[in-house]
Amino acid sequence: MTTACDEKQIELKPISSCRREVEVAMVEMLVSLQKHGWSAAELALELADASEDLVMLIATKKLRPN
């Protein structure tokens, strides 16, 4: 993701269509979770930790072809 930032807005520019779909789903999920009282900072940290865990799991497992 590339970003451009000014004082009031951050613009996200997706790199690929897959990345774009992931970002859209992620933002929808984060908006929904904020309605449950979680702060954006808490959610960002937990999302990063969960993503890292998934990457490590994938890296240590042999992937089966579909």
Image: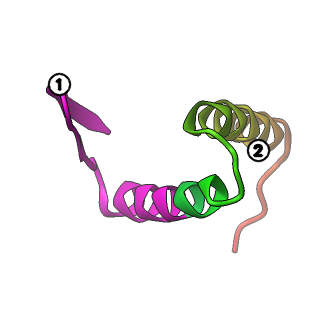
Question: What count of labels does the image hold?
Answer: 2
Question: Magenta stretch: residue 17 in it?
Answer: yes
Q: Residue at x 25, y 35 (%)?
A: 2
What residue does disc 2 label? 58
Label 2 or label 1, whichever lies nearer to me, is 1
Label disc, if present, on residue 57 of the rendered structure: none
Q: Amino acid at mark 1?
A: Glu
- The percent position of residue 45, horizontal first and vertical second, equals 66, 30
In this view, 18 is above or below 66: above
Query: With 40 as the anchor, is 27 left or right in this view?
Result: left
Query: How packed is label 1: few (under 14 Cα within 10 Å), some, or many (20 or more)?
Result: few
Q: Amino acid at mark 2?
A: Ile
Label disc, if present, on residue 7 of the rendered structure: 1
Q: Nearer the viewer, residue 16 or 38?
A: 38
Q: Which residues are magenta?
A: 1-28
Query: With 1 as the anchor, is 37 left or right in this view?
Result: right
Residue extending farthest to the bottom is: 66
Q: Residue at x 60, y 64 (%)?
A: 32
Q: Quadrant of the N terminus?
A: top left
Q: Quadrant of residue 30?
A: bottom right
- The percent position of residue 23, horizontal first and vertical second, equals 43, 55
Secondary element at image label 2: helix
Query: With 25 as the anchor, is 24 left or right in this view?
Result: left
Question: Magenta stretch: residue 60 in it?
Answer: no
